[in-house]
Image: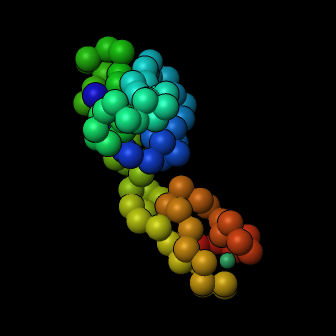
Amino acid sequence: MVYTNGNRFIVSNARNILESYGFKLFVKNEYASSAIGEVSPFDSWVELWVVNDRDYDRACSVLENALSKKGASPWVCKTCNEENDESFDFCWSCGAGPA
Ligand SMILES: [Zn+2]
């Protein structure tokens, strides 16, 4: 397993990043939320796996770089003070940039 998060939006973002680097991936628990009564909250987290074990280290560092490049935490728009997800390049509310 290379990445997991309770927020499937963040996981699919990570998946897009890795696929853009050409990694072969599969996703576990993608549809598990429909069975949430059966499993613990942790089991229903979406999990991202690399198909080839030898890709694991490289996938981890690619993901680390990609996620840290955009800042590891949400940012607050200086124009309108709305909080934006780390993956947004521009404010969802007013369209201003992060700097
Ligand atoms: Zn804004």
Q: Is residue 82 left or right of residue 56?
A: right
Q: Is residue 67 left or right of residue 98?
A: left
Asked where in the image residue 56 lies, by quadrant, the reply is: top left
Q: Is residue 31 left or right of residue 49?
A: right
Q: Quadrant of the C terminus?
A: bottom right
Residue at left offset 32%, top offset 14%: 52
Residue at left offset 43%, top offset 20%: 26
The residue sitting at the right extreme is 94
What colouring does the structure picture have? rainbow
Q: Quadrant of ligand 1?
A: bottom right
Q: Quadrant of the N terminus?
A: top left
Q: Position of residue 45 (x, y in %)?
A: 36, 38
Residue at left offset 66%, top offset 69%: 91
Front-lying residue, 65 or 24? 24
The residue sitting at the front extreme is 37
Inspect this view and state whether residue 82 appears. Answer: yes
Q: Position of residue 13 (x, y in %)?
A: 52, 42
Front-lying residue, 62 or 25? 25
Inspect this view and state whether residue 48 appears. Answer: no
Q: Position of residue 73 (x, y in %)?
A: 41, 65
Residue at left offset 34%, top offset 30%: 38
